[in-house]
Amino acid sequence: MTPTLTALLCLGLSLGQRIRVQAGTLPKPTIWAEPGSVINWGRPVTIWCQGTLEAKEYHLKRAGSPAPWDRKNPQEPRDKAKFSIPHMTENYAGRYHCRYLSSTARSAPSDPLELMVASSERICRGLTSGFTLQKRVCSQGVSPSHSPPWGNEEVRAPFNTALRSFLGSIGKPTLSAWPSPVVTAGRNVTLQCGSLRGFGRFVLSEEGEHEGSWTLDAQRHSNGETQALFPMSSSHRGTFRCYGYSKNRPHVWSEPSDPLELLVPGVSRKPSLLAQLGPIVALGQSLNLQCRSDVSYDRFALSKEGAHDLTQCLGRQPQGGLSQADFPLVRVSSTHGGRYRCYGGHNLSSEWSAPSEPLDVLITGELPSTPSLSAQPGPNMSSGENVTLRCQSRNQMDSFLLSKDGGANPPLRLRSWHRAQMFLANFTVSSVTSAPGDTYRCYGSRSSNPYLLSQPSAPLELMVSAPDTINLPQPQPDSKSGE
């Protein structure tokens, strides 16, 4: 090949490369938001745009705006730029793109970034009478699409009333798991996000190993509630939250629901669940449930049969090798009655232990009746004997329960039978299981809700006495024995 031809070929290649650069063949940049793309109302957010070291200037544009919102010079090492929003509001929510310019060309736009604003009643409660906000956000009739929304000029604006109205119109939805947040491995569960605010769509987000999000149109019920049902498998063991929004304001989301974690029981050693003062508690009183284990679990979860959420607590270690957590039930109502189990887990794992043995929490005072308790043949018994304790009521009771004051075991339950216009049950008590001065009470319940009890009967104290001593005649010495 002649030197002239070689030079022409090199010149052609160089021109071709330059033409492609001028046509905009720079790699498209990457765009993201910190701390995330869903930002609570009034919180700061930073949008980052990262290109190449050739970048001389970065442009950020929001959908619907004819010109870039802002321009920034790159930061060291000169391959990215940041755009700061000091206070997130509805005016900043939307779809963003960014691009960068070199000395000879302009990049293609980045993939879109959807930036959402979520209301937060906690922020609202923490506000004072004024709030520092960008002037263009507070000013009436100024659209942020007409000029860059961020600058150095700030004003104090008393807009609490408007903010509270905004938050009140949003409200957070509820998130629950059906049939239960405790899911057997390999089974499915449905997560229900619902609200009375009339949202048109719901978004479910998962944090953890299977991080992601799902969006569904809402279903409306006759009572005005809207909801969406998200089917999930037991492989999803992260933390879930859901949001609602109106279809005509897709970038303005509600406050997130309370978090919900699915619990898949494992095979590690099960903890013990106990009620420190016994599982029977009067309506309006408080009860403390304690989950404990000789395994050093970092956290514990409490589930109630038929409930659609879980309660979690951090574990504490009162002594080496032991761990426990307390779950107080404060001012109990009828909804607290039920069957409970607890589980242990470790912080760095989504695995949970096997469930504890069940514990039935029983609420007294829910049924307008007071049974009577009697001993047959009487409350005095000798050691080694049995006594029958009869619990009876004129009001219909499907079963009766017998409890011993201070007893560690759950109460005994028997189905009732009907005789002479009385509902009754007979409990056999052995002196072997009773100590002198043991006090018993009985309760009635109905099959429609076996965890709601009547008022307690009057206490009955059993007296156990030693058996009578029989004095046998002493043998007399034989007068002839000495002969």
Image: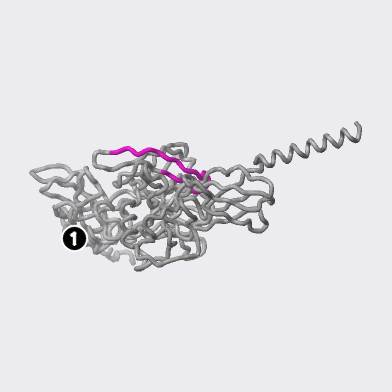
Q: Give 245 or 387, whichever is nearer the viewer.
A: 245
- In the image: residue 244, left or right of residue 60: left
- Residue 472 in view: no
- Name the spot of residue 213 as percent of width and height, x first: 47, 43
- In the image: residue 127, left or right of residue 370: right
- In the image: residue 39, left or right of residue 430: right
Q: Give 163 or 140, whichever is nearer the viewer.
A: 140
Looking at the image, which residue sits at the far top? 1
- In the image: residue 128, left or right of residue 470: right
Looking at numbered disc 1 in the image, what kind of residue is underneath it?
A: Pro
- Name the spot of residue 316 as percent of width and height, x first: 46, 62
| Scheme by which the image is coloured | one colour
- Name the spot of residue 426 as percent of width and height, x first: 19, 48
Q: Give 98 or 375, whichever is nearer the viewer.
A: 98
At x 44% / y 50%, what residue is drawn? Answer: 93
Quadrant containing the N terminus in the rendered view:
top right
User: Bounds of the magenta span?
Assistant: 203-220
In this picture, is 320 found above or below 21? below
In this picture, is 412 found above or below 154? above
Question: Does the magenta portion include 207?
Answer: yes
At x 49% / y 43%, what residue is drawn? Answer: 212
Question: Does the magenta portion include 430?
Answer: no
- Residue 268 in view: yes
Residue highlighted by disc 1 = 459
Quadrant containing the C terminus in the rendered view:
bottom left
* Element at label 1: loop
How many numbered circles are shown?
Answer: 1
Mostly what secondary structure, the magenta segment?
strand
- How crowded is the residue under tag 1: few (<14 C-alpha within 10 Å), some, or many (20+)? some
Specify the quadrant of the image occupied by residue 370. Answer: bottom left
- Name the spot of residue 307 as percent of width and height, x first: 33, 46
